[in-house]
Amino acid sequence: MTDNDDLFGGSAPAKRAAASGRAASARAARSAPQGTPGESGYDASTIEVLEGLEPVRRRPGMYIGGTDEKALHHLFAEVIDNSMDEAVAGHASFIEVELEEGGWLSVTDNGRGIPVDPHPKFPKKSALEVIMTTLHAGGKFDSKVYETSGGLHGVGVSVVNALSETLEVEVARGQTLYRQVFSRGIPKTKLETVGRVLNRRGTKVRFKPDAQIFGKDAHFLPRRLFKMARSKAYLFGGVEIRWKCAPSLLEGADNVPAEATFKFPNGLKDYLLHDIEGKELVTDQLFSGKITKPGSHGSLEWAVAWMSQEDGFSISYCNTVPTPEGGTHENGLRIALLRALRDHAERVGQQKRMAAVTTDDVMATCASMLSVFIREPEFQGQTKDKLATVEAGRIVESAIRDTFDHWLAASPQQANKLLDWVIDRAEERLRRRQEKEVARKTATRKLRLPGKLADCTNAGAKGSELFIVEGDSAGGSAKQARDRATQAVLPLRGKILNVASAGRDKLHQNQQISDLVQALGCGTGSHYKDADLRYEKVVIMTDADVDGAHIASLLITFFYRQMPRLIDGGHLYLAVPPLYRLTQGTKSAYARDDADRDRLLKTVFKGNGKVEIGRFKGLGEMLPAQLKETTMDPRKRLLLKVVVEAEARPETGDAVERLMGNKPEARFTFIQERAAFADEAALDI
């Protein structure tokens, strides 16, 4: 078997303390007065209180989701959202976005301008300074100021200020121009009166992101900013957005002009037509509309089309803020479309065929765009990626269902064409499922364990992989991280039976081993058939700790004893998940054990500031994206192939019997013989 010295880790150094030292510590603890520091040094002086914007700089991920490229561009989203709120409220007609050389970005609007008079609660500070330097300060908590707004957390522009090397604010208000400069959230100048301006009003925010937070190489991407700015113009037809970028920054940014002006009177309809241009549609017309209810709880706009040759997509917004993870408003749209189609099917006598159709069938090739405006929206997380307002779902479902029902009734020929298309998608889905069950004879059906085995969709063994993981928690992460086409996941509960010491009856009665054997489909012992093996690779993927190593040893013992030809055929592998994640600014790396962690600290992260080290308690604690990146993606992962050399077979058999057999004295002798090796490993650590 090929091995890795660090795979199962080394023995931890022993803890040694003199009896007299322990006694002295106990006496000191008893004699210490209440409230004084004890041995641990944990007292009131160790409690940190972060003030102002310091929490943002200390933990930027809590406010903008991280310090990567997406988070960097989220700064722009926070600033332009403020200007969009002014436009939606009817106070601004244009917004200017300019990307300058040197990493500077500015957003200017002709709205009312941030108030500059002294704040009632902080009379020594202007309202502008309070807004820029205080979390949860803004005009969006009062619905009298903004009917709807892009954010109600009150952390947007102050977070941008905290994470900027320099930020400059200019406010034209009452025919007077004011200016103030900040650095990393701290005012560098007082609010200055620049002078009189007759033909200008509104706010200009010009900032440069802090390299200490985002890294020296971090910079805004013109293509991404251009797309974000254009999408805002689509979302509110009454606003004009002017784009400008330094020509020197456009190298490699194809189709991004140095200057452009966006204004789209037809809103989302224009947006969707632009995105699906040249694609064949199921119906001749788009289903689009807009419902505005001033003074009510919300309004919305939508555009929907069904493509005949493409997979569908959904793009949604709440108060002009993108919600890439969807939310209640998208769910309302899906339900509305399905229910209206069911009503139409009943009118034309197709309700039986429509019975099997789900929202997934309706949305399979559907291109949809949805924008809602509601008061006091609730999002999941500070980055507002998913809308959680329950009322939004009801508003969207009610409005769109009635409108779509009328649209279908007005065009019966197009409606019937769409109905047939959706029913065909449902029948195709059911047919694929049936073919898959017949072809692969899935183990989940045999075992009557729904969800136990998450099978892959490949019809044959070639190129397919089975990951054996410990526990449902790790299984859940692995199922989300896998490639569904080629990777299957079978979670096992805890430590499986030690087949080297168990009797035949106990072996046959063990449910986990039965699950594993039936999932593989190749039989055991003399009944093993390589041609019936349902996966090309069988990968043991356990936690990177002692318990994980023990479970891996039990599984290897099972395969060695019950399916030796599976090992001989080169099908058995060990995954190498990381034990640590090291982060320093925008740089991150994974270490598989203590030695690898120390190596990274001395090489990759040497002398560049504080390194945060997180230890994974198990695979179930890892995010699916992390598990995929480090352990399951064939392009990046490390697999150890289990091999038994022909000349080493007698020695391997003896080692398995001594370590895993039913003679504890043999294990004890084995440990004694290698005690010196264990001591050396401990000293190395």
Image (cartoon, helix red, strand yellow):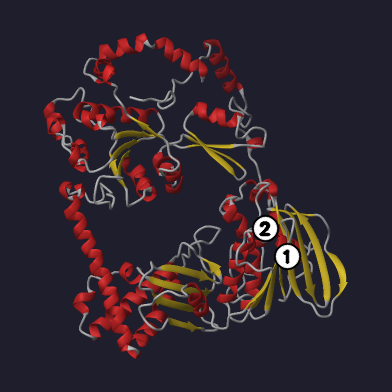
Q: Amino acid at mark 2?
A: Val
**Res 205 label:** 1
Secondary structure beneath disc 1? strand
**Compared to 522, does 207 lie above or below?**
below
Residue drawn at (82%, 68%) of the image: 178
Secondary structure beneath disc 2? helix
The residue nearer to you, when weighing 389 against 639, is 639
- Among the two numbered marks 1 and 2 on one chain, the one whose residue lies closer to the N terminus: 2
Q: Is residue 105 visible?
A: no
**Would residue 477 be found to the left or right of residue 75 on screen?**
left
**Compared to 423, does 165 lie above or below?**
above
C-beta proximity under 8 Å, tags 1 and 2: yes
**Would residue 444 be found to the left or right of residue 307 on screen?**
left
The residue nearer to you, when weighing 661 against 415, is 415
Question: CA separation, marks 1 and 2?
Answer: 10 Å
Q: Amino acid at mark 1?
A: Val
- In the image, residue 39 lies at what x, y percent? 59, 24
**Res 160 label:** 2
- In the image, residue 598 lies at what x, y percent? 56, 28
Q: Is residue 153 visible?
A: yes
In the image as oriented, which residue stretches furthest toward the bottom?
410
The residue nearer to you, when weighing 26 against 560, is 560
Residue drawn at (24%, 48%) of the image: 460
- In the image, residue 287 lies at what x, y percent? 41, 81
**Quadrant for the N terminus in the image:** top left
**Would residue 263 be found to the left or right of residue 560 on screen?**
right
